[in-house]
Image (cartoon, rainbow, N blue to C red):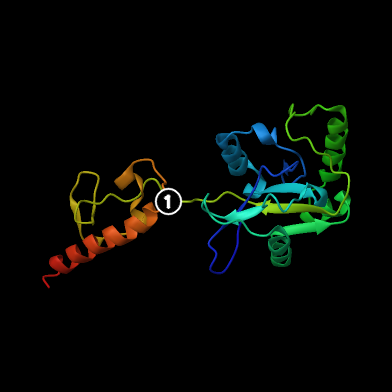
Amino acid sequence: MPVSGFQASLRCNINYNGAIWVNTAGERVFNEPKASSMDKRTIWRTADQNTIYVVLSESMLSEEAALFSGMMSNSAPFTNEEKIAELIELGYMFKADTIEELGEKIGAAKLAETVAMYNEDVKAGADSVFGRVDNLVSFEEGPYYAVYTWPYLMMTAGGPRINGDGALVREDGSVIGGVYLAGEIIGSANVAGHNTIGGIGHGLCATWGRISAESAVKNAGK
């Protein structure tokens, strides 16, 4: 979720109890509990405006399960009531007494139709659209919520090439004089392969910051 201020990003529990995913038209996009990480990436990448709404009702919320947490998987969760109020005020979450009103607020013309069909499927015990059988919970009582989400880039895998001194190099290995790099711009793949283990970003800053600084000083003849 896009946020501002000191908090760089915020994660929504996109597999929350009974919640459904809809696009900007208000249509569901897949079998939510069964969707793989690649399915989710594809949907976010190809969705209109790269936007997906996680839609749920008040009755689905539980203090035993946090709807929001920090970006890292081990980040402490937030209290639902407090964070929901904050995000509604910021305009990243929407609340309405009816599904029709919620659809109007997010500009999703088909949301009411989608939820009505979904509720009928829940009563029948089978999802007629995507075959969902897990975590089927109907939208019976309001208020209702829509959480605005979009894809985020946690860390780059590629990046400019550097040598052991932190100097920028061309594809053939020749040095581009006077340019030294540090931090995530060099890409974790240059150091740790296709990896995004927590803390790698700090290492790229601290380790290569020192190496590149020392190399730059040496290059400047100081």
Identify which amino acid the numbered label 1 is placed on: Gly
Name the residue nearer the viewer: 33 or 22.
Answer: 33
Count of numbered circles on the image:
1
Which part of the image, by quadrant, shows the C terminus? bottom left
Q: Is residue 181 visible?
A: no
Q: Is residue 116 left or right of residue 37?
A: right
Residue 105 can be seen in this image: yes
The residue depicted at 37 percent of the width and 46 percent of the height is 158
Look at the picture and state if 78 lies above or below 29: below
Rendering quarter of residue 129: top right
Q: Which residue is mark 1?
A: 198
Q: Position of residue 37 (x, y in %)?
A: 56, 37
Q: Nearer the viewer, residue 192 or 169?
A: 192
Quadrant of res 165: bottom left
What residue sits 84% from the left and 33% below the top? Answer: 122
The foreground one among 1 and 107 is: 1
Extreme residue in the left direction:
221
Residue that appears at 78% across and 53% down: 145
Q: Position of residue 106 (x, y in %)?
A: 77, 54
Q: Is residue 115 left or right of residue 36?
A: right
Tell me: residue 217, above or below residue 119.
below
Q: Is residue 64 left or right of residue 169?
A: right
Label 1: element kind: loop
Instruction: Tell me residue 39's x, y (percent).
Output: 60, 35
Q: Position of residue 92 (x, y in %)?
A: 69, 60
Furthest-front residue in view? 64
Quarter the N terminus occupies: bottom right
Q: Residue at x 57, y 57 (%)?
A: 76
